[in-house]
Image (cartoon, rainbow, N blue to C red):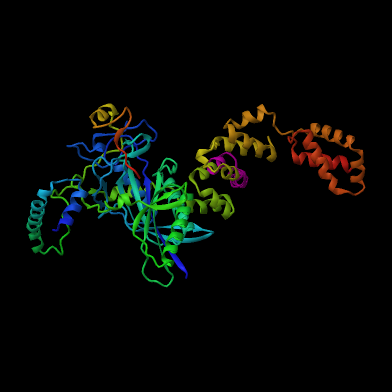
Amino acid sequence: MTWETVIGLEVHVQLSTKTKLFSGASTSFGSEPNTQVDLIDLGLPGVLPVANKEAFYKAIRFGLATNAEINQVSMFDRKNYFYPDLPKGYQITQMEKPIVGKGSIVINVDGSEKLINITRAHLEEDAGKSIHDLFDGETGIDLNRAGTPLLEIVSEPEISNAKEAVAYFKAIHQLVTFLDICDGNMSQGSMRCDVNVSVKKVDDAILGTRAEIKNINSFKFIERAIHFEVARQIKLLEKGESIVQETRLYDSVKNETRSMRSKEAANDYRYFPEPDLLPVVISDNELEEIKSTLPELPKQKEIRFVNEHNLEESEAKILASSKAMANLFEDASEKTKDSSLIAKWLVGDVSALLNKDNISIEESKLSSINFAKLIERISDNTISGKIAKSVLEEVWISGNDIDAIIEEKGLVQIQDESVLEDIAKKIIDANPDQVNAYKGGKDRLFGFFVGQVMKETQGKANPQGVNKILKKLLNS
Amino acid sequence: MDKETVTTISNLSRLAFDKENEEKITKDLENIIKFVDQLDSVDTSNIEPLTSPLEKTAKTRADEVTSKNRKEKFLKNAPNANEDYFLVPRVVE
């Protein structure tokens, strides 16, 4: 039997506003528990929420960048459920009239592109945090996050496998960071997703019963959770059993999904229009204003890098893939004209270090100023490419200034031809056998002499200079 | 309105009532719904749902921090808390 997987994603993006969706409390991450809480976040009697305009603007930026319909009149609804980290007993969200309607995004899987339609993107408030493992027999509640604006982006069930799901999540991540509407910090929970998974026989027209896996916050876990869930469902169906529509939790330690029946019983949210908030209207002028401030998006950047800097398409794609990478490239390009050298270093050595440590540019110690300086020192011949590699590794660890490292370690390239000639003569005098063999026709020994000079100078000799001088001395 | 529906609603809204009141409440709810159901006799097929009686739109705020840290006051007001957190009976995931 051949099975087909159908996946839809609900991605929650924490919008990078300074304050909450309905109160003037700060949203900054990592503060002491319960220090960023307003009367409104607590849902105390008599308070009224007031919507943060900036959250709407950020949501609209996403809508415009995904060619979506923007609802210039949007409304809020109440979603009712009880949980200790939700003080009001309801979440304010948008059900009937979300700010962003139908749109789409292009994902990239193994070099080929696929368009995924987006059903909607709506604003809602986040809940607080429950801490289960800190207190004996009790759960601690931190409400700093309560009321933080989220944009929930709902995809159509058009994703066919785990790989595509990860690509979709990455595409959203890339877009929201380029748009500057979310910091994209996954470990701080700035992006989380719920994955709806179902399987059906290839020929079946109707979708199978789906399970919803809640709250996954890493690329890796999305992939693993889907693999596990698809296998689980197929196994059940092949035994002739049926799938229960339910909410499941992914346990990354055991690498399995399991039922969260506790929440199941309360799965009737009794939505109704939020009586405390009037419709929010976005004027034509505001919409135009937001349009005019949209930044260059990854695809456009890629094309420009190819056209303006003569880069290879594959290089441009990597450089445009993250905002931080693109910034490094552009900052360095202003300092030195050798774009292909910059690209080569970013796509090569810098990417290799990032992969090795499994971090992003933002998390690394390499600043754009320092990187530009490194390229400058290579192109003005202060250091050789080989030395540059070790300097980069040093900066990677220490974050120190490039020039300071070069000076402190005495890494400046030896260019003075008379100095190089003295060293070359010394090497030639010390190796008469090799000289005779070379002169007798063993051309390959030339590399031996270059190597010896490099060794003598600890790699600091200018390679072109060494070649020139050795050729002159050996061929005379 | 049957007993099961009443039980579900009371569970969802976390409202408890005595067993002896169950019948009375069921009957009351039935009457309330009957009363409200009269509205169904009006043809609303071409009318946009009214979500607010006010023909106004929302005032919004600028994205500026206006709130202060009132942690101590808030925690003191809670039925149970320590110096950092509100405490509730353990919620098992």
Magenta-highlighted residues? A329-350
Location of residue A64 in the rendering, given as x and y in whole percent from the top left corner: 36, 53
Quarter-of-image position of residue B69: top left
Query: Up-down: is A279 above or below B74?
Result: below
Residue under the point 66% across and 27% down: A408
Q: What percent of the width, then of the height, locates residue A23? A: 27, 37
A110, A423: nearer the viewer? A110
On screen, A254 above or below A395? below
Can the viewer see residue A125 in this picture?
Answer: yes
For this orientation, the residue located farthest to the front is B20
Whether residue A331 sits left or right of residue B61 in the image: it is right
Q: Residue at x 60, y 40 (%)?
A: A336
- Of A476 and A86, nearer the camera is A86
* Of residues A163 and A135, the one drawn nearer to the viewer in this rendering: A135
Residue A122 at least partly seen: no
State which quadrant residue A136 falls in.
top left
Quadrant of residue B63 within the rendered picture:
top left
Q: Position of residue A391 (x, y in %)?
A: 64, 35
Is residue A340 part of the magenta span, yes or no?
yes
Q: Residue at x 70, y 29 (%)?
A: A410
The prevailing secondary structure element of the residues shown in magenta is helix
Q: Quadrant of the C terminus of chain A?
A: top right
The residue shown at (28%, 42%) is: A86
**Closer to us: A98 or A222:** A222
Residue A166 in the magenta stretch? The answer is: no
Question: Residue farthest to the bottom?
Answer: A203
- How many marks are shown on the rendered structure? 0
A447 relative to A383 in the view: left or right:
right
From what the image shows, is residue B54 above or below residue A395? below
- Image position, residue A317 (x, y; %): 54, 52
